[in-house]
């Protein structure tokens, strides 16, 4: 699996994914198809162009998403090709969930109505769909065992480890139940280090991904992340390249998430 993850990241991070979203969307669509899945595209207008979210999976109440765009000037290996690679592999494993690759998470669309996740969540609410849990995969590839490699917003450093060797589950206070159960299931299926944080939405970083689009619509949702700029010195830079990532640990995280999602699916039958 680690090799497949690397191949996905290499392909997606071969170029920036902002002005040209279609090349990345096409790759994701092809990867889903090669896994024997039937991708569906949801098109919408944004900034005078036609862009799309790409989705696979049945009508599960569990949604897993990852944005595929980048900031200008960065190839975005960790942000967010790493998470898209994990998304593709989870879908290929036939984990019982809906998997969506979102357009337009980065600026200038962040926290606007033109975010791909905003469009998807708003339409799901309008259709009266049930979403029991949404997981935003946000940067899953950068790890460090060095002391002091992990930073935090003010005060949190007193409660969490100083080594960036774990995966974090992050939610606002309204999604704390989902956070607690997700951590329990993840830890029951994997020995990979994990940490959880439920905090008020005003705490820096709590709302900084596609899960917030779902929280705005009242759906339980959280972010799974390597903590981005709190760990990765290449965040949003030209140096965010595939060689910086740890694909063996990414594979371990993928397997842990698969076990977690299967557990949640059994609860939501």
Image (cartoon, rainbow, N blue to C red):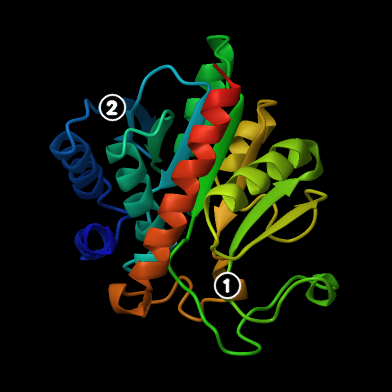
Place of residue 163 in the rendered image (x, y in percent of width and height, measured from the top left): 63, 81
* Residue at image point 58% right, 9% down: 128
Residue 39 appears left or right of 262? left
* Residue at image point 86% right, 73% down: 155
Q: CA distance from mark 1 to mark 2?
A: 31 Å
Residue 57 appears left or right of 62? left
Would you place residue 231 above or below residue 97 in this image? below
Residue 117 appears left or right of 85? right
* Residue at image point 62% right, 59% down: 168
Q: Tag 1, which secondary structure?
A: helix
Q: Quadrant of the N terminus?
A: bottom left
Would you place residue 104 above or below residue 149 in this image? above
Place of residue 82 in the rendered image (x, y in percent of width and height, measured from the top left): 37, 60
Q: Nearer the viewer, residue 43 or 37?
A: 37
* Residue at image point 48% right, 43% down: 259
Q: Quadrant of the C terminus?
A: top right
Give neighbour class at mark 2: few <14, some 14-19, many 20+ (Cα, 10 Å).
some
Q: Which residue is mark 1?
A: 229
Give neighbour class at mark 1: few <14, some 14-19, many 20+ (Cα, 10 Å).
some
Q: Which residue is mark 2?
A: 41
Residue 42 appears left or right of 30? right
Place of residue 67 in the rendered image (x, y in percent of width and height, measured from the top left): 42, 47
Q: Tag 2, which secondary structure?
A: strand
Q: Nearer the viewer, residue 197 or 100?
A: 197
Q: Nearer the viewer, residue 157 or 14?
A: 157
Place of residue 31 in the rendered image (x, y in percent of width and height, measured from the top left): 19, 43
> In this figure, what is the number of numbered marks?
2
Specify the farthest residue to the bottom.
147
Q: Is residue 235 visible?
A: yes
Q: Is residue 105 visible?
A: no
């Amino acid at each position: 699996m680690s090799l497949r993850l690397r191949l996905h990241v290499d392909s997606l991070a071969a170029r920036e994914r902002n002005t040209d979203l279609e090349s990345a969307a096409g790759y994701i669509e092809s990867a889903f198809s090669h896994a024997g899945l039937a991708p569906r595209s949801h098109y919408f207008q944004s900034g005078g162009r036609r862009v799309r979210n790409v989705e696979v999976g049945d009508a599960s109440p569990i949604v897993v998403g990852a944005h595929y765009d980048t900031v200008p000037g960065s190839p975005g290996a960790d942000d967010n090709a790493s998470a898209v690679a994990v998304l593709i592999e989870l879908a290929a494993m036939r984990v019982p969930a809906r998997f969506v690759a979102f357009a337009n998470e980065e600026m200038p669309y962040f926290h606007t109505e033109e975010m791909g996740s905003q469009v998807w969540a708003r339409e799901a609410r309008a259709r009266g769909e049930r979403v029991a849990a949404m997981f935003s995969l946000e940067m899953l590839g950068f790890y460090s065992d060095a002391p002091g490699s992990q930073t935090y917003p003010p005060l949190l450093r007193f409660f969490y480890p100083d080594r960036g060797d774990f995966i974090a589950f992050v939610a606002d206070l309204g999604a704390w139940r989902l956070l607690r159960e997700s951590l329990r299931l993840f830890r029951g299926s994997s020995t990979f280090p994990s940490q959880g944080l439920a905090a008020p939405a005003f705490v820096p970083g709590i709302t900084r991904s596609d899960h917030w689009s779902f929280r705005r619509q009242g759906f339980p949702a959280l972010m799974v992340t390597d903590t981005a700029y709190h760990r990765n010195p290449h965040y949003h830079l030209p140096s965010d390249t595939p060689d910086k990532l740890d694909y063996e640990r990414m594979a371990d995280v993928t397997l842990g998430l698969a076990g977690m999602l299967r557990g949640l699916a059994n609860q939501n039958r």
